[in-house]
Image (cartoon, helix red, strand yellow):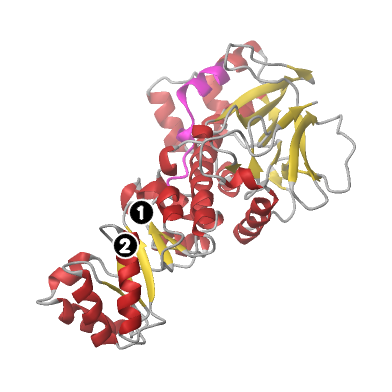
Amino acid sequence: MEQIGPSTALLTDHYELTMLGSALADGSADRDCVFEVFARRLPGGRRYGVVAGTGRVLDAIADFRFTDAELTQLERTAVVDSTTLSWLADYRFSGDIDGYPEGELYFPGSPILTVRGSFAEAVVLETLILSILNHDSAIASAAARMSGAASGRPIIEMGGRRTHELAAVAAARAAYLAGFATTSNLEAGRRYGIPTRGTTAHAYILLHDSEEAAFRSQVAKAGPDTTLLVDTYDITRGIETAVRVAGPELGAVRIDSGDVGVLARKAREQLDDLGATDTRITVSGDLDEHAIAALRAEPVDAYGVGTSVVTGSGAPSAGMVYKLVDVDGRPVAKRSEDKASRGGRKSAVRRHKATGTALEEVVHPADAPPELGEHDRVLPIPLLRAGRTAGDLPTLEDARTKLRRAMVSLPWEGLKLSRGEPAIPTTFS
């Protein structure tokens, strides 16, 4: 799997290198430490979060090197001293990482990722790890809500024009993990094997002297199973023209503006009257999970979602933090008001009813696990051992499957889109 964007260790943060230099100077850099990634709360009163980006984190750590170019920049700008510069030149992460696999649900306090190593090795990874997990988990959490609202109808991710060009590729991956069927982003398709789909834009219709000429051109190239954009001028006339050109075997029509629920209803009636009973209706245009839910009763076959999914639908960051919780086997914790952490290396178990419904998440000291019931499940898995991948890790398709199963395990109220408490409580032992 390829890293998104430039593989540069300067993706780290200035203050991380300040801590590194000071720790090297006072002799504390080699102390055995445990850092933990967790979220204190879920964004916007949401009821669950979805872990995404773990695979990208592991790839990024494997590629995390300070090359001559980065070292020259640090030396030229006097960010670090010569001792720190020499240490960075040989940097390789050699510690252990455990974490929730991609596609797993998380809740406030869940130990999503645990990084064990020397202080020096682990501290320089903070920005790298958080930038990936906070972005990808925010996108996946929003996309999962949209997938749930769609009730099995496919959604295409089409937000590449609404975010940074590199973030768009990661967003497409996270949305696919969370249940989207396809993406319009060809780089995401190449890099991650995600199915790609796309139709024409209004510019293609406007290019031609008439709507009919545009449709005939598209059908001649793509065949009658293509999707024709019918709302450039007048939707009723557009649908009539589309069926006349492509025949009743027309694959789909797309509606990209207006009151798409009402328009989809009218389009379905018109298509059926014209004999195009199998022609699908795709809608797009500023859709989010709430708009998709409002369209459940309408004859919509598929959705196209852009801006809302690549921006986390109002929550562009998952709010995860990276905190030191153990030094040389001694628990340490931050006590600041509203930003407290819990000391010690942790693991977690999710308890379920016999029916499979999740009851609670128990976060416990890693060396004192609770007794497991028949339906309980340990959540973190080994990811890296001594800096190397810990066996065969879950694939992107595995993550999609895991999330589908996890969503089924949520109590019914946990699937609501309204603001509320986390779907299952987190308890600490």
Span highlighted in magenta in the image: 5-21
Q: How crowded is mark 1: few (under 14 residues within 10 Å), some or many (20 or more)?
A: many
* For marks 1 and 2 on the same chain, the one whose residue lies earlier in the sequence: 1
Question: What secondary structure is found at the residue carrying circle 2?
Answer: helix
Observer-nearest residue: 355 or 388? 355
Q: Is residue 163 left or right of residue 131?
A: left
Q: Relative to 184, say whether 162 is above or below.
A: above
Q: Looking at numbered disc 2 in the image, what kind of residue is underneath it?
A: Val
Residue 127 lies, in percent from the top left, at 51, 31
Tell me which corner region of the image, top left, top right, bottom left or bottom right, holds residue 385. top right
Across and down, in percent, residue 287 comes to: 37, 52
- Image quarter where the C terminus lies is top right
Q: Residues within 10 Å of mark 2 (few under 14, many from 20)?
A: few
Point out residue 28 in the picture as x, y percentages from the top left corner.
67, 15
Q: Is residue 381 magenta?
A: no
Give the residue pinned by disc 1: 160
- The dot on residue 262 is 2
Q: Quadrant of residue 92?
A: top right
What's the residue at 19%, 76% (across, down)? 237
What residue is shown at x 35% (from left), y 54% (from top)? 160
- What amino acid is at disc 1? Gly
x and y percentages locating residue 122 in the rendered image: 63, 29
- Residue at the image position 64 percent from the left and 15 percent from the top: 334
Above or below for 307 versus 79: below
